[in-house]
Each structure stands twice: as structure tokens, then as C-alpha cells.
Amino acid sequence: MNEDQKIVVVGTGGTIASRYNPSQGRVVASKEVEEIVGVLPGQEGLPRLEFQNFAKISGFEMTIEVAHGLVKHVAGLLANPEVGGVVVTQGTDTIEETSFLADLLLPPGKPVVFTGAQLPNDHPQTDGPRNILDSARAAASPEAVGLGVMVCFNGRLHAARDVTKVHTSALETFQSYDHGALGSVDEKDVVIFRRPMIRLTLSAEKLDKRVDLIRLVIGIDARAIDAATAAGVDGLVVEAFGRGNATTAFGRGVSRACSAGVPVVVTSRCPSGRVKAIYGSGGGGGRDLEDAGAIFAGDLRGPKARILLMVALSDPSARMRLRELFYTIAP
């Protein structure tokens, strides 16, 4: 990063900005991002920082509309030649979805790093200040240029495409199961282990397509998928069994949805591994679902497949090549 450039830290709320509110009897997102950074130790050698507060909401209250507005705001910051990179603080519940949305929509080049905390701002061992410090160092590092949008947590850097929140409360909550972390932030050193080869950049002025996510369980019938189709959804993502299989009843619902022109994307409810159309049965095997018109999403997990389908359906140049897009980002 050029010495004359700055890193912009954009706050949106989340646990990292939360404190216990005795009048409400609960933890509430209330802190400005500059107040969090103000208590950081060891700021020597940090780039010039600018602070903005885009929102003050919990991660579980994040919506597609707010996330899309956030990504557009970050895009505007990146277009400024005085900005060398951006750090976004957010609630961890939805950080994997927001960061992936940003990765799909932002131009490659300048680093964008999402981070947050597992412990509130007023906790004596809060992890938020360290995560911001690490993220700012990563966003300012020449090594991070061109890596795409990242998530920095507990000293590790992860690709937005790969990262998943895997633990409700542990500090090491973000993992990239199949591919591993991109690198680490070790005090002032940013060390990159690998550079991701799979990227996809789309555009969407509006994200108003409704895509539902259905998780399969033993003995599931077609009520959920038939109801979603009847309600007029624009697309469906199915977290299927294992390699991408369903019950016969549900598989027939997939066939009906595809016949009605509703795109159905198949992922796995397993936390790791790829879906593949292999098995056949009375209509619920993976090969049966593919024959019915379903799109298989490789190793992309359900929430991210939903984000990609929403963006692709909102991008006129992408809508007609959904299968190609999913294969590109999740071969």
C-alpha cells in the first residue's frame, strides 16, 4: 500500500460493538467503531486509519438490503485513490454471507477484510480489538492485494468463498474446512500461505430476488419445496443428504419446481465435501435430481449458494448461465 493511502474501518455493529445494557437486561450493539479501536495497544506502524459507522445492528439482524448497501458503500471507498483497503466490522452470525456477497460484487485488487468478535466489547477478554488490529495490518499489506475479500479472525486470514462459522462461542470459530486458511497475521507480520485460484465477479444493481434455503432431514416430504414454489420464490437451494441426495418424495418436488421454471441448486448438509450426481432411486438420488434440472454446487455450502443464486438471478448477464456460474466457482 502507498504510504499516502489510508485504511477505512467501517463499523456495522455486532458483538464487537456490543456492551451489556442493564436497563434492557441484555447485550446490545452500541459502540462506535472508533471507540473500539481507541483502546488498541501496539498501534505503532499501523497505517493511517479513518473510521465510519455504516450501521449499528447485530449480525442476526443483517438483511440482504443492508448487506448490499454496505457492499456498494465499500465499492465507493475503494474507488478513492486515497484508500488502500477497507476493514468491515460485523456480527459473526452472518459474516460469511456478507463477505461472500462482497467478494462476488467488488472489483479485485485492494484488500477488503471483514472481522468481528465472539466476546462483547465490555468483556475483560474481548477479542474485538485484536481482530481489528490484525485486519488493519492485513488490509495494508502488499501481500494481501488481489486475494479477494477476506475474513480475519483470531490471527487467521480466510477467503470469503471458503470460510464458515463452525462454533457458537469459541474464538477460533471461523474455519475453511476443505481448503485451509489463506494466511495469518503474526503481530506486525502478514504471512500468506496460498492464493485462491477460484474467483467470480458479478454485478447487481438490486438484490430483490427471493431465494429460499431448505435443509433435508430423514423422511422429509415435498411440502416445504411445493409451498415455496407456490409462494412464488425466484430460486431454491437445497441442503441435501451426503453427496446430494433426497427422499423420493422431495425429489419429485424438485422436479415440479424445475418444471415450473424455478432454479434449484443442490448443496450438502455435510460441513465438508462436494456434491456430485451419482446415485439413482425412485427420483431422489443425486442423478435423479440432476436429470430433473437441478444444479449441483460442488463444495459451496448452502448459505453461500443462496447468495450466489440471488446475485446471479439479479444480474441480467448471468441469469441465463446459472449452471456455468456454479461450476466456475464450485467445480
Image (cartoon, rainbow, N blue to C red):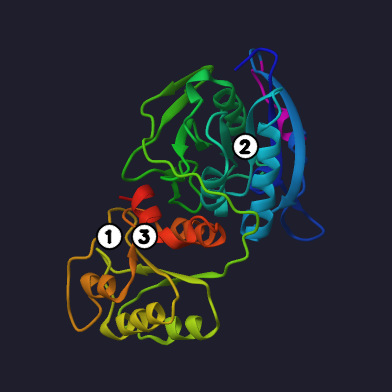
Q: Which residue is mark 1?
A: 275
Label 2, secondary structure: give it.
helix
Residue 278 shown left or right of residue 252 in the figure: left
Q: Residue at x 71, y 30 (%)?
A: 37
Give residue 325's position: percent from left, percent from top.
40, 53
Quadrant, the N terminus: top right
The residue under the point 58% across, 39% down is: 115
- Mark 3 touches mark 2? (CB < 8 Å): no
Rendered position, 295 above or below 152: below
Mark 1 residue element: loop
Q: Is residue 174 magenta?
A: no
Mark 3 is on which residue type? Arg
Q: Residue 128: give its label.
A: 2
306 left or right, relative to 74? left
Q: Nearer the viewer, residue 160 or 252?
A: 252
Which residue has dot 3 on it? 323
Query: Which residue range is magenta in the image?
Result: 35-43
> Is label 3 or label 2 in front?
3
Q: Earlier in the sequence, mark 1 or mark 3?
A: 1
Predominant secondary structure, magenta span = loop
Give the residue drawn at x 59%, y 22%.
Answer: 140
| Within-10-Å neighbours for mark 3: few <14, some 14–19, many 20+ | some
> Who is closer to the viewer here, 94 or 26?
94
Disc on the earlier residue, 1 or 2: 2
> What is the three-letter code of the residue carrying label 1?
Val
Asked whether the viewer can see residue 326, the reply is: yes
| Residue 302 visible from this viewpoint | no
Which residue type does callout 2 highlight?
Answer: Gly
Query: In terms of image quadrants, where is residue 238?
Result: bottom left
